[in-house]
């Protein structure tokens, strides 16, 4: 009896892992995604970001954990795949342009950012995808806040079905 239960649980775990991989939407055209630094705050850090982008959103991290900085380069036509982050992230577009789509936006109205512009991603479960719709490489630098120690700063997500890609 125990052996059958063990085999059944093992098969169920393998199947759920496979389904998660199948449902994830991987990126493409990512030329590099170099983590340039990762560090833990040594004092209690309380982060509040107030974003006024048509509506006011306040993002609050009561006890920020690790912070990660990453450089990403996307080829023309490249995209990140649908994903989220554990905490807020600040992205700076160094060159090219980047169009970001929110998973909860049923109209699939992307917002395009160009070189010299920055934006805040709320993280905390906000599913999104970023695409390089331009004809040149896009380079962006992202700082991720409130990453659990030793854990990923990017969480793959299934395609929410709100956009036709």
Image (spheres, rainbow, N blue to C red):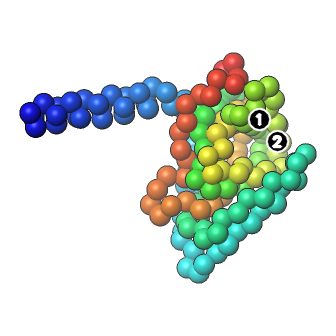
Residue 31 in sight in this render: no
- Counting from the top left corner in percent of width and height, residue 126 is at 66, 44
Q: Residue furthest bottom?
A: 43
Helix, strand or loop for disc 1: strand
138, 107: nearer the viewer:
107
The N terminus lies in which quarter of the figure? top left
Q: Position of residue 80 (x, y in %)?
A: 62, 36
Tag 1: Cα neighbours inside 10 Å, few (<14), some, or many (≥20)? some
Marks 1 & 2, CB-CB < 8 Å contact: yes
The image quarter containing residue 69 is bottom right
Residue 4 position, x and y percent, is 13, 30
Along the line of sight, which residue is nearer the eye, 27 or 160? Answer: 160
List the single residue furthest toward the top.
Answer: 164
Mark 1 — residue? 99
The quadrant the C terminus occupies is top right
- Outermost front residue: 1
Q: Which mark is residue 113?
A: 2
- Residue that sits furthest to the right in the current view: 54
Q: SS of the residue at dot 2?
A: strand
Q: Is residue 42 left or right of residue 61?
A: left
**Which residue is pictured at 53% across the width and 44% down the height?**
155
- Locate residue 103: give its quadrant: top right
In the image, 2: left or right of 94?
A: left
Vertical position of residue 62 compared to residue 5: above or below = below
Q: Position of residue 65 (x, y in %)?
A: 56, 67
């Amino acid at each position: 009896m125990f052996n059958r239960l063990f085999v059944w649980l093992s098969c169920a775990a393998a199947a759920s892992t496979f389904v998660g991989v199948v449902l994830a939407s991987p990126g493409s055209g990512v030329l590099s995604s170099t983590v340039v630094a990762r560090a833990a705050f040594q004092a209690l850090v309380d982060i509040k970001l107030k974003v006024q982008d048509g509506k006011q959103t306040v993002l609050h991290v009561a006890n920020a954990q690790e912070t990660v900085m990453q450089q990403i380069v996307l080829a023309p036509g490249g995209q990140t795949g649908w994903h989220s982050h554990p905490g807020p992230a600040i992205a700076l577009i160094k060159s090219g342009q980047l169009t970001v789509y929110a998973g909860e936006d049923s109209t699939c109205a992307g917002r395009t950012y160009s070189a010299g512009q920055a934006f805040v991603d709320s993280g905390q479960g906000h599913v999104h995808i970023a695409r390089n719709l331009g004809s040149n490489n896009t380079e962006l630098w992202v700082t991720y806040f409130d990453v659990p120690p030793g854990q990923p700063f990017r969480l793959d997500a299934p395609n929410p079905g709100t956009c036709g890609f």
